[in-house]
Amino acid sequence: MNTYIDWHAPDYLDLPDLRMAVFQAGEPTPHRPSVVLCHGFPELAFSWRHIVGPLVEAGFHVIVPEQRGYGFTGRALSDNHDAASAQLYDMPHLCADLAHLLDALDIEQAIYVGHDFGGLVTWQLPFYQPDRLAGLIGVNTPFIPRLSSDPIAAFRGVKGDDFYICAFQEFGMAEAQLDADVAHTLRCFYRKGGFINSEMRNPPNLKEWDNFELLKILKRDESSWPGHMLLNEADFAIYQQGFERSGFGGGINWYRNFTRNWELSADFEQKVSVPSLMICAEHDAALPPSMAEGMAKYVADLETHLIKDCGHWTQSEKPEELAHLMVDWLSRRFA
């Protein structure tokens, strides 16, 4: 692992209603935009640990925020830990955080990189914060045009009420279960051939895994889970410490805004004009490469790549290949 960042010692930025923990490496330059790496769920800034070094060595200034609700940053300052506070984690707030981050660092524009839910946020920046964008990179997460109906209703119709996003909608229930044993929860997610990797083969209770019925899966003994641990002991400990610090509730609140975000986006023209790179992972069952098909209809300046033999956790599973694709594109497009 590179030594560019001490992942135990973030800087803190005072943003509106948030004290954001941020890690940085490299130096800003007028010749190249800074690169902001945005994690998903249940992730931390540390998820990008293998990607920072190659970017810095290629001459880029790298900013890695621990986002609203997570790790060192924790919850919004006005969060009362009640259902009404969930709206503090809607798309306008999450996108504004990424713009305020640049304000605090006196940076005009950046290239934003998003994985998992971090990608859902960064693909919305062209609508909420268009002036702050120099480019976009989606890691596993494609640009998804606005659905014609409420996404939660659609999820319930296809996957059922036990699908994890649907189960997350009831305030208090999911976070109580996930927080009760942080290590157990994280071992469920961070598996090779496990929870959200399509290469798993006929695990016990297949329906629960196929439908991502997380709360049911967590009630089962780990010996029944497919696959094997992806993270080594030292890396796992950092994730465990991060979520023991913040809990899972802030991150779960992001999911409680699917309907609200859909309602707020009714008037957005579904077009992205900035230079964009899409990197798919062959075995990601949650965000399969097929979801990126047709992106060119909405993203005018798009380059797409596929990382083979890779599941959902691309930064950990195939870091060298991911970093190579990112550095190559960034160096060509922002020389």
Image (cartoon, rainbow, N blue to C red):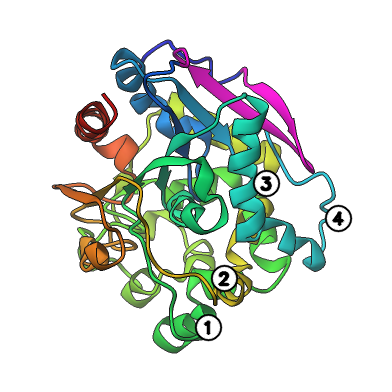
Magenta highlight on residue 296: no
| SS assignment at label 4 | loop
In this view, 294 is above or below 2: below
Position of the C terminus by quadrant? top left
* N-term-proximal mark, 2 vs 4: 4
User: Is any atom of residue 67 visible in this view?
Assistant: no
In the image, 125 versus 316, the foreground residue is: 125
In front: label 2 or label 4? 2
Which residue is depicted at the point 65% across and 29% down? 21
Residue labelled with disc 4: 80
Estimate the spatial distance between the alpha carbons at disc 2 and disc 4, rounded to whole Å: 20 Å
Residue labelled with disc 1: 150
Give residue 221's position: percent from left, percent from top: 46, 58
Is 263 on the left or on the right of 272, as rendered?
Answer: right
Mark 2 residue type: Phe
Residue labelled with disc 3: 247
Q: Which mark is residue 258?
A: 2
Residue 284, located in which quarter of the rendered image?
bottom left
Position of the N terminus by quadrant? top left
Estimate the spatial distance between the alpha carbons at disc 3 and disc 2, rounded to whole Å: 20 Å
* N-term-proximal mark, 2 vs 1: 1
| SS assignment at label 1 | loop
In front: label 4 or label 3? 4
| SS assignment at label 2 | helix
Give residue 231's position: percent from left, percent from top: 37, 35
Segment colored magenta:
9-28
